[in-house]
Amino acid sequence: MPIRTVTSPAASSASPSLRLSLSLLTVSFCTFAALCLLLHAPMADLLVYRAEGEAVVHGGDLYGFTVTEWRLPATYPPFAAVLFVPTTWIPVPALKTAFLAGNALLLAWLVALSARLAGRPAPLPLLGAATGLALWLEPVFQTLLFGQVNLAIACLVLWDLTRPPGARAKGVALGIAAGVKLTPAIFIGYLFLTARRKEAATATASFAGTALLGALLLPAATVDFWTRRLFETGRVGKAWIIDNQSLQGLIARATGTAAPGPAWLLPAAAVTVTGLWLATRTRDTSDDGDAPADRAAPCDRAPHRDRWGILLTAFTALLVCPISWSHHWVWCVPLLAVLLAEGRTLLAATAALVFTARTMWLLPHEGDRDLHLPWWQQPLAAPYPLLGLALLAGAAIALRRRGAAPPHGTGAALPDGPQLSARSSSASMIR
């Protein structure tokens, strides 16, 4: 008697979508690997990390060397160099392969965390397809191409901030991320400003712990970094080149000035204050207080109350950091997830176009030509900071439409601004 296998309709319908997703993911990463081989991608930043690890192992001058044909120095705190010691344990070709695989997994995790931030489920077919497509966003592509740690930093921050209130050791991962790259420390300020002092204190203690560990293991390098190297922004790179997608880079190119000075510092201070103020006001408090139990309880499919506060803080940091290379903007992944989850298809498509068009690389940028671009090329040379400023402007307009600002210490959902209210966005479908 023949045995009949019964397959549920759900399983049979999921299989084609899963196969299509895995095919897209495979083709995407195989194409990327082929491009790496074709372009002889050196993964230059990874070589810097390895050199930092070797300096720790052999007792060399952590901030006295340069590597690769671009003469790249170490720019991170000593704690980061300690973490890079394992990169010295295997040959460079194997290290590049391992780093590429690790970044691919981190990209998938960032996509999943972005879905959690947006309050959307991330089934395997969607996760695979989104990961395969996200690879071609310019910041993500460059991160993998250079062997950077941007995805790891973003994942640490986003994972920590989207954990439930009162979660054990919440803030530790954020402090560690700030200990590797100082920029995430802005989120500690965001936690303080939104009256989450316990989480902010935990993150501060974690960050201080990374500095203390670096001081114990590398005392000379610690003194050198915190008293000297930290203030040598020129070590990181030239502020005026198109690679720099920060507010300073935009102003330097627009004014034709290699060192804009006050022309950058004053706008940067204004953007910092405005960005953090907007971030604290867009925090959704609809899940607080006497909200119904089914909404007050943590739920992976409920939009996170901090979704726009987190995004505005991240983009503020990218804008005001003296150097924000294009590959630092991997926060485009959660931005796109939130826009799609809120049904803002046109805005999501526009943002996706900005982050895939690579307009800055189409412009002449040999030598100092970045400083002599005509006016009509300026927007093409600074797509990311212009998008970041537009995001802040949109949040400000939305808050103004709502009328008076909320009381101190609370935020406001923006039904007509850059976010929807929790009630409407959780009920809407992705369009």
Image (cartoon, rainbow, N blue to C red):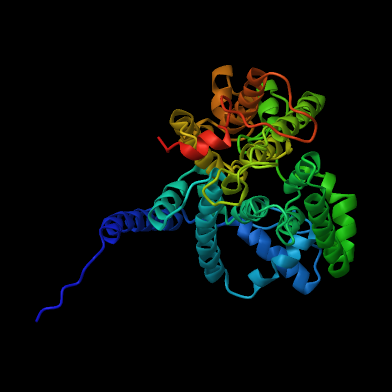
In the figure, is residue 220 to the left or right of 393? right
Q: Horizontal and vertical percent for residue 283?
A: 68, 36
103 versus 336 height, above or below: below
Q: Is residue 361 visible?
A: no
- Identified at 45% across, 46% down, the residue is 136
Q: Horizontal and vertical percent for residue 220?
A: 89, 63
| Residue toward you, 89 or 308 | 308
Q: Horizontal and vertical percent for residue 223?
A: 90, 58
- Identified at 84% across, 59% down, the residue is 211
Residue lying furthest bottom = 1
| Residue toward you, 179 or 254 | 179
59 versus 174 height, above or below: below
Residue 103 location, quadrant: bottom right
392 versus 13 height, above or below: above
- Identified at 63% across, 26% down, the residue is 395
389 versus 189 height, above or below: above
Q: Horizontal and vertical percent for residue 55?
A: 76, 67
Q: Quadrant of the C terminus?
A: top left
In the figure, is residue 159 to the left or right of 203? left
| Residue toward you, 6 or 118 | 6
Q: Is residue 107 visible?
A: yes
Q: How many marks?
A: 0
Q: Quadrant of the N terminus?
A: bottom left
In the figure, is residue 98 to the left or right of 37? right
- Identified at 87% across, 64% down, the residue is 215
